[in-house]
Image (cartoon, rainbow, N blue to C red):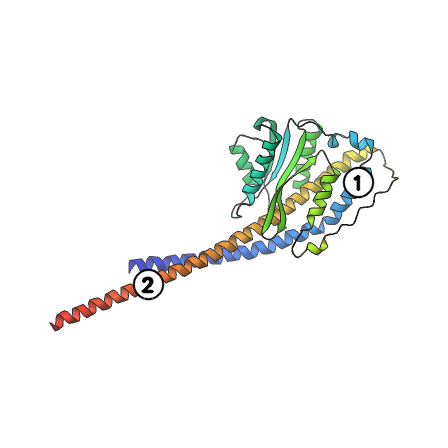
C-alpha cells in the first residue's frame, strides 16, 4: 500500500508541474507575439536609416570617418546577447557556440577578444573561460530600453573609434519562425550598408503570420544632396544612431526568440508530463489490482483454512 501512496503522490506532483508549464507556455506565446509586433513597428525606422546611409555611401568624408574604417583584425569586441534565465532549450548555448566558432575562424586568441555581455548567461559563460568582460548589461526579456541600446552602442563606438579594437560584432538569436531560431553574428563596426540592408530584410520573418509583409522595394537614393552644417559633424551624430539599428533589432529578435524557445520548451515539458502521468496511472492501476488480488487470495485462503 505504501507503493500505491508514493505513485499517487508522484501523479499529483506531475499534475501540478504541468499546470505551471502550461501557464508558462501561454505567457511566453503572448510575449513572443508582442516582441514580433514591436520589431515590425520599428521596421520603418530601420528602412529610413538604411536610406540615409545609402544616400551618403559614396561620400569621401564617410569613407574617412573613424566608424567606417576597415582594418586588419588583430583585436575584436563581441556584443553577445543572451537571456538572463534558462528554461529555453538551446537558445543561449547556440549563441555562445556561434561566438566561439566566429572567434576561432578569425584566428583570435582570448587576449585579443573583448566581450560586452548582454544577459547573465553570456556574462557567466565568458567569465568562466577567462575572457575579458568589458561591460555587462542585464537583459530584461520584458522590455528593450532605449538607454540599454544607447549604452551598448556608445561603448562599442568609443572602443572602435579609439582603435581599441578593429571590429565590433554582435551575436544574437535571429527569429525565423516559432519553432526555428538561428544564431547570428553581424558586424556593426566598421559600419556597412550591406550589413544594415540584411538587418532590415531580416526584420520580417520568412514564414509565418507576418511573412506577407516582406517587400523587395528599393530605397531611393538621390544623386544630389546637401549636408549641413558639415559632413563631419553630421556623421559624428548620425552614424552611432544608424549603428543603434543593429543593436535595437538584435535585442528585439533575441527577445522574440527567447519567448518562442521557452514556449516550445514548456509545451514539450507539458506533453512529457502528460505521458509520464499516464504511465504512472497505468502503474498505479496495476499495483492496486495486484494488491486487491493478493487480499482476495488471502481471504479465500483463510476461509478454506477455517473450513478444514
- Residue that numbered label 2 is attached to: 286
Q: Quadrant of the C terminus?
A: bottom left
CB contact under 8 Å: marks 1 and 2: no
Number of on-image labels = 2
Q: Quadrant of the N terminus?
A: bottom left
- Horizontal and vertical percent position of residue 39: 68, 49
- Residue that numbered label 1 is attached to: 54
Residue 50 versus residue 24: which sits nearer the camera? 50
Q: What element carries label 1?
A: helix
Q: Residue at x 57, y 53 (%)?
A: 28
- Horizontal and vertical percent position of residue 177: 62, 52
Q: Which residue is drawn at 16% across and 71% down?
A: 303
Separation (CA) of disc 1 from disc 2? 72 Å
Res. 133 image quadrant: top right
- Horizontal and vertical percent position of residue 71: 71, 28
In this rendering, would 101 be left or right of 189? left
In this rendering, would 254 be left or right of 157? left
Res. 106 image quadrant: top right
Residue 142, visible in the rendered structure: no
Amino acid at each position: 500500500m505504501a507503493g500505491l501512496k508514493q505513485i499517487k503522490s508522484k501523479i499529483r506532483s506531475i499534475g501540478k508541474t504541468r499546470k505551471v508549464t502550461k501557464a508558462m507556455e501561454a505567457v511566453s506565446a503572448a510575449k513572443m507575439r508582442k516582441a514580433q509586433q514591436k520589431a515590425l513597428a520599428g521596421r520603418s525606422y530601420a528602412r529610413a536609416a538604411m536610406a540615409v546611409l545609402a544616400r551618403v555611401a559614396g561620400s569621401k568624408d564617410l569613407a574617412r570617418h573613424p566608424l567606417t574604417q576597415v582594418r586588419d583584425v588583430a583585436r575584436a569586441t563581441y556584443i553577445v546577447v543572451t537571456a538572463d534565465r534558462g528554461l529555453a532549450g538551446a537558445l543561449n548555448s547556440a549563441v555562445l557556440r556561434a561566438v566561439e566558432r566566429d572567434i576561432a575562424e578569425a584566428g583570435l586568441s582570448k587576449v585579443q577578444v573583448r566581450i560586452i555581455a548582454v544577459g547573465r548567461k553570456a556574462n557567466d559563460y565568458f567569465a568562466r573561460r577567462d575572457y575579458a568582460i568589458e561591460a555587462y548589461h542585464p537583459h530584461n526579456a520584458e522590455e528593450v530600453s532605449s538607454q540599454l541600446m544607447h549604452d551598448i552602442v556608445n561603448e562599442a563606438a568609443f572602443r572602435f573609434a579609439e582603435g581599441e579594437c578593429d571590429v565590433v560584432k554582435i551575436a544574437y538569436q535571429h527569429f525565423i519562425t516559432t519553432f526555428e531560431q538561428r544564431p547570428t553574428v553581424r558586424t556593426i563596426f566598421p559600419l556597412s550598408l550591406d550589413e544594415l540592408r540584411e538587418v532590415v530584410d531580416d526584420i520580417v520573418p520568412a514564414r509565418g503570420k507576418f511573412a506577407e509583409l516582406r517587400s523587395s522595394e528599393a530605397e531611393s537614393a538621390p544623386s544630389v544632396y546637401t549636408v549641413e552644417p558639415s559632413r563631419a559633424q553630421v556623421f559624428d551624430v548620425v552614424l552611432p544612431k544608424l549603428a543603434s539599428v543593429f543593436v535595437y533589432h538584435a535585442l528585439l529578435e533575441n527577445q522574440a526568440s527567447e519567448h518562442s524557445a521557452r514556449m516550445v520548451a514548456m509545451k514539450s515539458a507539458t506533453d512529457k508530463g502528460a505521458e509520464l502521468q499516464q504511465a504512472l496511472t497505468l502503474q498505479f492501476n496495476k499495483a492496486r489490482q495486484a494488491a486487491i488480488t493478493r487480499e482476495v487470495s488471502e481471504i479465500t485462503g483463510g476461509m478454506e483454512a477455517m473450513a478444514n
